[in-house]
Image (cartoon, rainbow, N blue to C red):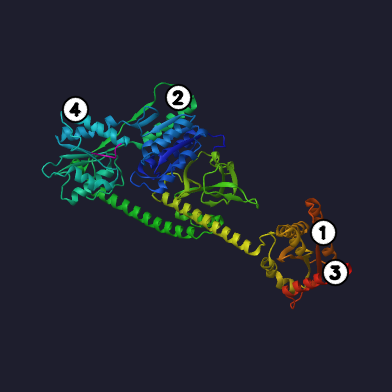
Amino acid sequence: MLSGKRKTIGAFLCKAYSLFDNAVYRVLEEEAKHLDYNIIVFTTVGYFASQNYYDQQERAMFSFAPIEELDGILVAPDTYEIDGFRDELMNAIRERARCPVVAVRHISQELDCVHTDEKNSISPLLEHLLDYHKLKKIRFLAGYEGHPDSENRLNAYRKAMASHGLTVDEEKDIAHGNMWYNCGPGAYKALFSDPEDWPEAVVCANDYMAAGLIREMLKNNIRIPEDVIVTGFDNVPSLNLEELKLTTVEQDFTGMARAAIRELDRQIRTGDSRNTREENVSIDIPAQLVLSESCGCGKRDHHYYAALNKSISQQLEALSNREVGMTYLSIEMGGCDDLNQMHRVLIEKKSDTPQLQDLYICLFENGRNEKGEPAFAKEMTDTVCLVHVMKDKQDCGMPMVSFDRKQILPALAERPEPQVLYLMGLHQNEFAYGYALFHYYPDQVPSQFFQHFNIVLSGALSNIHKRNEILALYEERRLSSITDVMTHLLNRRGLEERILPDWPGLCARREYMTFITFDMDHLKEINDTYGHQAGDFAIRAMAQALHAAALKDTVTARMGGDEFLTVLSGADQRAADEFIRRFRKELAAINERERRSFQVEASCGTVVIRLDEMKTLEQCIRMSDEAMYSEKEKHHQMRH
């Protein structure tokens, strides 16, 4: 992608299937075509409360992303909740970015930013409670300390209370949650510990915490809004409140994202950026107060419930179908022995990811093996290999093309039109295998199965690596069992393993085979006179000469001690004599080069046999041995 003529924007988001991220993605799809950019969304996962090893591996995204190569960066820092992630990302951008950077939904003195006008967003809600409802005892449920959105809303709460002459008790009136449902019990305990001193209202920093608190309040028979008013922030459409709809504030995520990408485009086109001026650009996007049942100012009619029931039914059906699809995909991917099988399963199961239009899988590569095939790594490398391509739901094969990871994708995978790709790392435990690139159909966004699908891919790659390691270990053990340790030639077992599988066919076709047995001369005298190290040298010299003389289909083995056997398929006596000539020439060259106090010499015996169904390999070897001993006896008689 980065190798093309079109400029590339990188977007950094966490939890790609959240309400905010989905809104951003839709805008990116529209604006990429309108403004003619390729956009890569470098997405990670991770929640404040998870703190697991998978999340920690996501840190690699910040070093992996080619920040230096991007033409513009859109970043949402407050989506990174795990301790240290936000700082690490911002440090990477600060040190490496050479392009305009715009933050979205984030107030920053360092970056150009587009964000909700917090002062004029939650303030109307507080004014509504203070002026319309005439409340005085209002408490605040904040997120975890340091969450930027929560801190801004908490400060607005303090100012609104102070402007009405109301004192805020920092310990009693403010509780901290985690921006999620499960903080409900703790928040209830902190805010409602004294039955004689309940608040009149609780303002929550987001809808999820409001929902968790309301559920806990209902368990304890506290009526809403009759006993206590509860409000939220964000107006999450999918929130399932059992008995009432929240009074909340709706942020214009779409407006924020559109303003951010257009400001980024302006800076790219004009050369303007935060580095060229003293002050940053700060664009406020207004939000909207949504009054509803949790403060008593709204009521849902039967049309709302009919539409809600229909929507929930459709969501449950889709959820069930995807759960079944993911389950079977997990099973089949878990059974993949190699990348070819994984590719085939992904194509066969493409209907289980109906939103997904294109899928690319790129694996870190550590060079090529002796066959010229990619050797895949388990850690981040500078070179990656494109191993799977699906475009428009069609199988585009396994290109196995290597390229620089800064390109993200090779030119052959690029589309002529602008595109938005989600990039997620493929990793498990301490191992990193590569990354996947997802492109969705227009009007489609990543669902809650987005991360699940990616984890299934990672698990399949982990299984393939483990299987390959086991096979490599098995092959190493097998080779050691059929290879002579000293000479690295085959041993007798290796010879049999090489020849016996083809033996019935050779016999049926009555093929000719030549067997040559070599026996070293005077090995005992060499050992007795010069020591066993000299004898070992002599044995290795024999092996080197035999190996050097061998042609492609020659099989040579050390049969034991100082005895070797060479088998030539389809050869006659002339071919055998030529092999022996090459062997003696190589052995003489070794003797000349080493200039030892002794000469390494050998006797040999040759038999050319036409095979038939009655012949066995053992018989042929015995006949070759007998020929060698006969030849050796003749030489002995001639010397005496």
Q: Earlier in the sequence, mark 4 or mark 3?
A: 4
Q: Amino acid at mark 3?
A: His
CA gap between label 2 and label 4 equals 38 Å
- The span picked out in magenta is 141-145
Q: Earlier in the sequence, mark 3 or mark 1?
A: 1
The residue tagged 2 is 275
The residue tagged 3 is 636
Magenta stretch holds residue 383: no
The residue tagged 1 is 584
In the image, which disc is placed on residue 163? Answer: 4
**Tag 4: Cα neighbours inside 10 Å, few (<14), some, or many (≥20)?**
few
Which secondary structure class fits the magenta region best? loop
Helix or strand or loop: what does disc 3 sit on? helix
* Whole-percent x, y for residue 627 in the image: 81, 71
CA gap between label 2 and label 3 equals 93 Å
Q: Is residue 602 above or below residue 62?
A: below
**Tag 1: Cα neighbours inside 10 Å, few (<14), some, or many (≥20)?**
some
Answer whether labels 2 and 3 touch (C-beta < 8 Å).
Answer: no
Helix or strand or loop: what does disc 1 sit on? helix
Give the left or right position of residue 567, taking residue 193 as reference.
right
Q: Nearer the viewer, mark 1 or mark 2?
A: 1
